[in-house]
Amino acid sequence: MAQGGIDSYFMITERGSTYKREILAGVTTFMTMAYILIIHPGWMGAAGLDRGASVVVTALMSGLFSFLMGMYAKLPFALAPGMGGNAFFAFTLVKGGIVPWEVGMGMVFVSGVVFVLLTVFGVRELIVRLVPKSIKFAIGAAVGIFIAYLGMRDAGLIAFSGTGIKIGSLGDPRAVLSLIGLFVTGVFLARRTPGGILLGILVTAAIGIPMGITKIPESLFAAPASIEPLAFKLDILGAFKLEYIPFMFTFFVGDFFSTLGTVLGVSQKAGLLDKDGNLPEIGKPFLVDAVGTVVGAIFGSTTITTFIESASGVESGGRTGLTAITTSICFFLAIFLVPLATCIPSQATAPALIIIGLMMMPGIRNIVFEDFTEAFPAFMTILVTAYTASIANGISSGILFYTAMKVLSGRMREVHWGTYILCVPLIIYFLGLR
């Protein structure tokens, strides 16, 4: 395209941005979410998947669907394997001994197909309008609490006993390294250092070298690992068992509401919402997200979703799809960093998770705490997520508590009739949990 054509296509001038601002915003987004190249393969490796192949698949899928988000939806949103969904896959389904990883990928694929169908027929947009505002505002905080919990666990700062959660062994060198990393990353962010989260991970990993925790790779760059150990290994037929429906519904609920919260929250910061608080053509980012989940599962990735770290690019001035395309290019280049990505210990990435949890909390300021029927369901959304370590449980319970509180307080007319229908599958979801 000619320069004018690019400007017109992406509406750069119309949205008050510039080429330089869009490119810098895209790089900023990448730097704040590049940790996914370290954390996601690490969790997949813990579940028995090939870690090197997972790094490449993560970079490929993140790059491809960030590019499609930019070109098709023309929005400054980047995508990658979703935090929460990958934890559920790795630690609950696979390490928990419920299913082999191939069947787990089959579940992700099936849930992705459902996403696509619901998006094409406009059902996802309808559901968005049925979710109470108070729950929408609580979603980001609930996801943040869950991610912070994972970070505290990986850091060794919390431990589990017969009586519940307790402080971990703070004298353990791994916990010490995590604490150092928490302060290092915090200082970078407090000083507004570009890419502070990624820099925090790298500095903490470097500090871990003399401590004997970080293992130095033979080289920093290498040809991409083969994706053959993961690609096309999913077992779709094996996922079609009645007892697996609740698990697939978990993928659905978690990805759906995570994407919803990210899209609306980041769009609000970018000034892209209309007067009613809705995003015009919201079906486009939903479709990219849904197709990403289907294709990602085929190649060995868990649910692909829109990342909340896209907000960092928006705060840097990104307003159009050119931001997402710039981020995608960075991901494609990162494919050659497999040795570096796979040598980073979890104690170096845990501080990033804790801090990212903080970044997702601001939405709660929009909750009307003076109205108990609004505040209590929002609180339960966050509370249930925190104490069950499940985003799906939190959001589902929040919707049910909202409906119940409105009905029992004689304000049932404030609940959309469709929300009552939505409660039926959510009740079934909870009844199916063990």
Image (tube, rainbow, N blue to C red):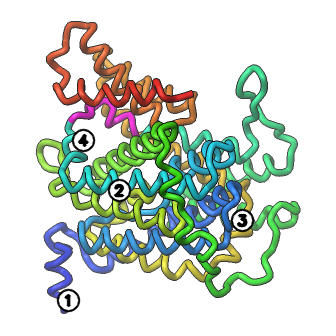
**Counting residues from the N terminus, which is met first, the one under dot 4 or under dot 3?**
4
Residue 417 magenta? no
Residue corresponding to mark 3: 344
Q: Secondary structure beneath disc 1?
A: helix
Q: Type of residue at label 4?
A: Val
Distance of label 4 from label 1 (alpha carbons): 36 Å
- State which quarter of the image contains the C terminus: top right
Q: Which portion, as a residue range, is magenta?
A: 130-139
Cα separation, mark 4 vs mark 3, equals 38 Å
Chain-order first, disc 4 or disc 1? 1
407 vs 29, left or right, is: left
Alpha-carbon distance for marks 4 and 2?
19 Å
For marks 4 and 2, the one nearer the N-term is 2
Q: Earlier in the sequence, mark 1 or mark 2?
A: 1
Amino acid type indicated by mark 2: Val
Quarter-of-image position of residue 42: bottom right
Where in the figure is residue 51, as x and y percent of width and height? 67, 67
Answer with mark 1 or mark 3, whichever residue precedes in sequence: 1
Disc 1 to disc 2, C-alpha distance: 37 Å
Residue 78 seen in this snapshot? yes
Q: Nearer the viewer, residue 109 or 381?
A: 109
Residue mark closest to the camera, 1 vs 3: 3
Distance in Å between CA atoms under marks 1 and 3: 41 Å
Crowd class of label 2 (few under 14; some 14 to 19; many from 20; radius 10 Å): some
Q: Which residue is mark 1?
A: 3
What label sits on residue 128 in the rendered view? 4
Residue denoted by label 2? 113
Q: At x 40% / y 27%, what residue is drawn? A: 428
The kind of secondary structure element at disc 2 is helix
Instruction: Provide the secondary structure element on which disc 4 rests.
Output: helix
